[in-house]
Image: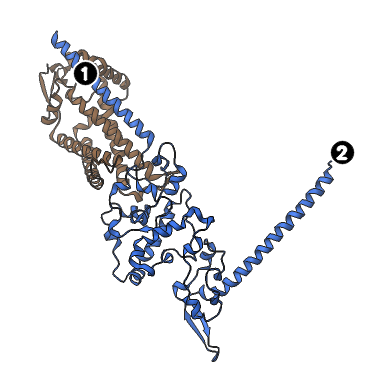
Chain colours: A brown, B blue
Amino acid sequence: MPNKRIYLYPVWIRLWHTINAILMVMLILSGLSMQYSNPNYPLIRFDLAVKMHNISGILITVFFLYFLLAIIFNWAGKFYRMPLKGYSKRLLKQVKYYMFGIFRGEKAYFPVNEERKFNPIQLLSYNLIQFVAVPLVIITGWALLFPETIVLNFFGYSGILLTSLLHVIMGFFISIFLIIHLYFITVGHSVTSNLKSIVTGYHDIDEEDSVATQTENSTTLQNNDTHKT
Amino acid sequence: MAKRFTFRSLKKTALILATIAFSMVSFFTLSSQNETEALNEETTYCLSCHGHETYEINDTITGEYAKLKMFKELQIDLLKFRQSTHGEFKCTDCHSSDFEDFPHPFSAKAEASYLCIDCHGDDEDYASYHFDTIEQEYLKSVHVTEKGDDFSCWNCHNPHAYKLTDKTPGQLGNRIAENNSVCLDCHGNINSYNSLIGREKTDLIKSHEWLPNQPLHFSRVRCIDCHAATHDSILVAHMVLPAEDAVKNCVECHSTNSILWGSLYKHQAMTTRNELGFYNGMITNEAYIIGANRNYYLNIISIVIFILVVIGIAIHATLRYIYRHKKHAK
């Protein structure tokens, strides 16, 4: 049972996370509504969906820049560093844990502590979403907001068509990420513990996983060393 | 003994054939040249006045000359006329031969001009254009119901410059611009609008303010796509509707069942329909319509990925639940 509390999510990140979540949901719903618009079954009326998508898109850009500046100038940036040496092995280990170990109640190979917020799978998916998918969706979104800026013909294909496809594909990946992200709320010490953490900012960890006590545990030490390289 | 084909005999035959071919080409060229010359002669005569902004008349008694202005409506652009579908006609093919006299007699001026249907109605060569249906649709249009005889085909179509728009792929933007310029000649021109309608022109930018991304809509959709009722058998809708009946519901265009397939993209819809349905044959590379252009394969792939993710999560959650209960039971 966890016996130590660490302050993992400071106010600025919880604020960004909440706003980002609301805006993302609004963007996904309005985006789906436009992409699969149907006169008989409108999810959101088309013109409202367009307005909602545009406003949320502009706001999410502002908050993305806020997030970017915060992790560049704040201590949180270190959590996103992904040393490639031995990474595939660590990733495989985490995959194995989620596929088998988790059911048997095994202890997590890469538990959360003061120095490590994300396990190898989270590290990869968060980096891909935050630094590939979201920037691409924002750039293509702004281009579609000013379509006259888009190149008319790109090697025989309409620039607007290609931009839209990229926008929709990235939007889809973000939606899939969101579904899995929501499921992983339940994969904590208890079903609701992760949810409580993101609300209060405090995360319960095992004393032995803490950086302060890691020297007593050789496995944790090994993991931590690879993380630092 | 059979006659052998030698190089010399082949050469002879070729020479005879070449002579026949040359004389045939010369004959047809000369005869068509004669026709063109006759055509040019009459047209040149008419256009000596009607091809310019001013013309000169002289008083046969006093011998005085006067330079007068040729009204814009009576001016003909020779180049545009020659390139038009009617470009091979002589002036008197359509206009009274009384016009050959100068000054033109009243009888010529009073004569009613031909309308499209007068030549093209019941003409088998033009059956595919359905001129009769065009006429019926046009008679129901707001232009006729509001203006009656003051309005005719020629208010929109200039018979001296008319030509079919280029419907080849890649020409969509030009086709839209050409088509919209017909409407804007009056609706975008304060003088022409006033002289015909007699009231203040609507500010088009203001009246279309509700339309998001107005410049894009104006350059990628034709006015008639929203302002005219389509008819199955004609390519271009001619039943122009009153402003209040125009399409104002986004999803009428922005959906897979887009009305644009029956109007703007009708030509392509008829030529590129494929087994994946209209909207995929319609990914024309020339336009992207949110909600209407959906990529069939991406749709399938995304649905499959979505279902797999949901199933994966369901299995994972169930296994976690089962194992947790087993552990508790122990």
> Closest to the observer: B152 or B19?
B152
User: To which residue does mark 1 refer?
Assistant: B318
Image quarter where the C terminus of chain A lies is top left
> Closest to the observer: A111 or A228?
A111
Residue under mark 1: which chain is it in?
A: B
Q: Find numbered disc 1 in the image and state the secondary structure of the residue it sits on.
A: helix
**Kind of residue indicated by mark 2:** Ala
Note whether B290 is above or below B37 in the view shown. above
- Left or right, residue B224 beside residue B322: right
Note whether A67 is above or below B15 in the view shown. above
Where residue B63 sits, quadrant-wise, is bottom right
Q: Which mark is residue B2?
A: 2
Note whether B85 is above or below B196 in the view shown. above
Residue under mark 2: which chain is it in?
A: B
**Kind of residue indicated by mark 1:** Thr
Picture residue at 27% right of the left edge, 58% below the top: B244
Residue B274 in percent (x, y) is at 44, 39
Where residue B27 sits, quadrant-wise, is bottom right
Note whether B219 is above or below B9 in the view shown. below
